[in-house]
Image (cartoon, helix red, strand yellow):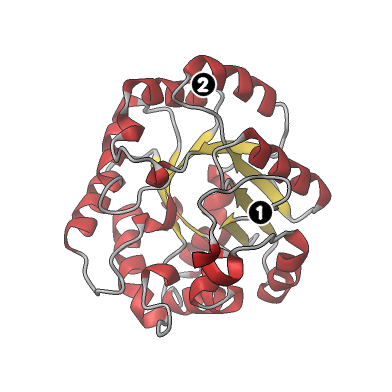
């Protein structure tokens, strides 16, 4: 079974503008590219990765596609088009779809001032266009502002495969579930919604976290979605704000150690292969 990291990023500050990336991010506020990740993948035994957009721009998408051409362990790219302008989105998707690495779209909705951006009529129409190309949508559903919209998107665009990034950033540091758990359960009722076991370390205490902190949230997600709709992602290099690649990989594996082999295989690769249509 392939081991797939279904969520990682690269950024090149001289080729693409990333306004959100400022010195407050410390060690990751610099150009970070594939050669830096490659040895970490080999050490962890990761076969393939999915590069996810880090900016709402064509330049970022084109940069990721270039990287995919250069490194055989990159299996897929989640890029960007202006979903709020469906006509333009259609033209760009027609172009990007010709590239075999282009598998889906994401928009940094958590950077939008309007927390309801994703359910605007124009954006939903753009998501219908996306679905018509059999491409996927990564939902940056940062709790509490966006996760609640996932069921509506699933109903409005039932033929769109949606994945909730980072389990919507549950309140791990505060050891709470509450409304997050209720919203996640509602989202899980829709078969076209999946979720990523990713970015959890940066939702925990950055200086003191382990598998035991993550496990209750992963267990709950598995109860709701089943392993066949969950996929591992490192969220590297953002993960470096609270540890490193090796720790994220090893502690996630510890958190799911009691699962069956089939469940672990699904979360660590099988689900991502199915969702993003990745071939071995």
Front-lying residue, 140 or 109: 109
Image quadrant in which you'd find residue 2: bottom right
In the rendered image, residue 250, in percent from the top left (x then y), is placed at: 54, 79
Viewer-side label of 2, 1: 1
In the rendered image, residue 258, in percent from the top left (x then y), is placed at: 41, 77
Number of marks: 2
Q: Is residue 173 visible?
A: yes
| Quadrant of the rendering where the N terminus is positioned | bottom right
Q: Residue furthest right?
A: 70
> Could you tell me which residue is drawn at 56 percent across and 35 percent down?
80
> Could you tell me which residue is drawn at 70 percent across and 61 percent down?
47
Q: Residue furthest top?
A: 87
Apparent side of residue 39 relative to residue 2 in the rendered image (left or right): right
- Circle 1 crowding by C-alpha within 10 Å: few under 14, some 14–19, many from 20: many
Apparent side of residue 117 relative to residue 130 in the rendered image (left or right): left
- Circle 2 crowding by C-alpha within 10 Å: few under 14, some 14–19, many from 20: some
> Could you tell me which residue is drawn at 68 percent across and 23 percent down?
95
Q: Earlier in the sequence, mark 2 or mark 1?
A: 1
In the rendered image, residue 27, in percent from the top left (x then y), is placed at: 59, 71
SS of the residue under disc 2: helix
Q: Circle 2 sits on which residue?
A: 132
Apparent side of residue 159 relative to residue 74 in the rendered image (left or right): left
Q: Circle 1 sits on which residue?
A: 11
Q: CA distance from mark 2 to mark 1?
A: 29 Å
SS of the residue under disc 1: loop
């Amino acid at each position: 079974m392939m081991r797939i990291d279904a969520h990682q990023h690269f950024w090149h500050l001289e080729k693409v503008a990333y306004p959100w990336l400022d010195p407050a991010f410390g060690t990751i506020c610099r150009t970070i590219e594939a050669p830096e990740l490659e040895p970490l993948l080999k050490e962890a035994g990761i076969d393939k990765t999915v590069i996810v957009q880090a900016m709402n721009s064509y330049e970022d998408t084109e940069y990721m596609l270039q990287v995919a051409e250069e490194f055989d362990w990159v299996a897929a790219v989640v890029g960007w088009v202006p979903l709020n302008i469906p006509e333009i989105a259609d033209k760009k998707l027609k172009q990007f779809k010709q590239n075999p690495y282009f598998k889906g779209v994401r928009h940094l909705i958590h950077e939008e001032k309007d927390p309801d951006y994703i359910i605007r009529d124009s954006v939903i129409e753009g998501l219908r266009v996306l679905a018509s190309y059999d491409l996927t949508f990564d939902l940056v559903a940062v709790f509490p502002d966006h996760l609640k919209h996932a069921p509506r998107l699933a109903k409005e665009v039932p033929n769109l495969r949606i994945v909730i990034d980072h389990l919507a950033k549950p309140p791990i540091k505060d050891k709470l579930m509450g409304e997050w758990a209720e919203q996640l359960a509602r989202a899980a009722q829709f078969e076209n919604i999946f979720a990523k076991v990713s970015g959890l370390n940066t939702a925990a205490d950055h200086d003191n976290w382990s598998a035991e902190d993550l496990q209750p949230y992963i267990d709950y997600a598995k109860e709701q979605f089943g392993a066949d709709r969950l996929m591992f992602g490192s969220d590297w290099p953002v993960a470096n704000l609270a540890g490193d690649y090796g720790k994220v990989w090893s502690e996630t594996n510890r958190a799911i150690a009691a699962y069956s082999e089939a469940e672990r295989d699904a979360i660590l690769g099988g689900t991502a292969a199915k969702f993003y249509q990745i071939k071995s």
